[in-house]
Amino acid sequence: MDMVCSDMNLLELDRVSFRYHSDSPLVLNEASLAIRKGECHCISGPTGSGKSSLLNLIVGCLSRPFEGELHIADGVVLGLVMQDPNVQFIRQSVGAEVAFALENLAVPYDLMVGKVQAALRKVGLYVSLDMPIEQLSLGQKYRLMIAAQLVYEPDILLLDEPWAQLDDMGVDELMSVLRLLKSDNVAIVLVEHNPAAFSDLVDHFWQLKDGKMTSGCFQSAPISFTRPGYIPVGESVLAFEPFEFCFEDQSPLFVCHDHLELFEGEIVALVGDNGAGKSSLLKSIAGIQSNVRALPLAVLGKQPKLGIFGGELGLLLQRPNRQLFENTVLEEMQFSLKRFGLPLENADRLLREMGLEDLKSHSPHTLSYGQQHLVALASLASLKPKVLLLDDPLAGLDQAFYCRVWQVLVSLSQQGTAILFSSHRQMNHMPVTRSWQLSDGLLYDDLSLAGVESVSAG
């Protein structure tokens, strides 16, 4: 990498082109970008357009060569927070992860604790330094990785899809941190499907599409959904009695004082902040969450346990790469169909409905985070399960795929599938039957959205 750069720019890309394989399309096609001190750049583009690849190229994480020039000024320090922060963690505990950078910089031990705590406070993560990272939610892990980068005192901070991973409070806290960094002449590069959330901070907006980088203002067209006709709910498929949600040997994470039920044909949103317990609850419903006290819960008339539901229950994990294991997208789609004796044409139909036909021969392991979410969801939807549990299924999606996912979910609900999906934002303008709210240690049923038939979201 050439380290010679003009005095004005911290980093320059000059007509950079890149492709993963010699016979694959260009991910970047003569892309150019110049970044100066204190600037904030926001890069948007369709799901799978190469935004994360661009960040990885900048920090030197891509193994294949590229064409064009990449210049980074002498002494410039880069910090990167990937879309899935799990792939970046080195240590087991919160404090050790943030301290890792300080150890490499030979910071004296008596100064370390204060610097670690200060970095965690900057990102609004108030947890014990000894807390195991595996006990954090994905949003909390994203905050942790930001803190781990801040202790390096980077000259350029690169963030991949922060809005999707953080709740609204987390975004507000991040905005405060980024404003402070800008005032200290730190440059910021955001890859973001929702640039409007950071519009007050951004100096330059970019669109990456078909390998081309173009500058200009962001455009955010309204999204409209119509749920055709009122869908009467059917039989109960999931029922909770009042309970306390506890990990073994720990205080309750949250309490539910109500009798909760999920019915055939419903789309229910489970809404709560990062770390509230949404993912753990969904995994408990599916019978795969370990170290949780037994819950007064029946799913399809059974006590949840791994493997007993067959194709009647589907769970989309928050990290979709953990449930993708076949060599191609089509083989991934067909695996469970073969297992449960269902028509293989369901795979092709779902790929068409979700606009994924062009990916059927691709390896799911080389796809973007958002594309992996789509493939994993399509694999589950093709089974037409009675119960579908989705953990943050909209993360990493552009507006076009966002709409396609909703269309698929509404179609499934019309066929009787009961859908429960988690989100750290309210779904007041989406085609949901109602919400289960998880806040301040309480889980309760919010009936205010019941009967919504036609909605519009901006």
Image (cartoon, helix red, strand yellow):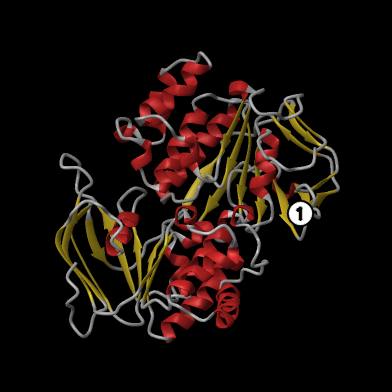
Quadrant of the rendered structure where residue 2 is? bottom left
- Depth check: give the residue in front, 353 or 211: 211
- Is 161 positioned to the left or the right of 21 in the image? right
Residue 384 place in picture, x, y as percent: 55, 25
Would you place residue 408 above or below residue 256 in this image?
above
- The residue that label 1 is drawn on is 253
Q: Locate the N terminus and report the quarter of the image it occupies.
A: bottom left
How many C-alpha atoms fall within 10 Å of the one at disc 1: few (<14), some, or many (≥20)?
some
Residue 56 place in picture, x, y as percent: 32, 58
Residue at the (22%, 53%) spot, across then down: 211
Helix, strand or loop status at disc 1: loop
Would you place residue 235 above or below residue 28 in this image?
above
Residue 154 place in picture, x, y as percent: 39, 76
Is residue 428 visible in the rendered image? The answer is no
Is residue 23 visible in the rendered image? The answer is yes
Residue at the (19%, 74%) spot, across then down: 3
Residue that lies at the very extreme toward the top in this rendered image: 341
Residue at the (15%, 42%) spot, across then down: 22
Would you place residue 335 above or below residue 104 in this image?
above
Type of amino acid under label 1? Leu
Residue 289 place in picture, x, y as percent: 67, 40
- Depth check: give the residue in front, 141 or 188: 141
Residue at the (21%, 51%) spot, across then down: 64
Quadrant of the rendered structure where residue 365 is? top left
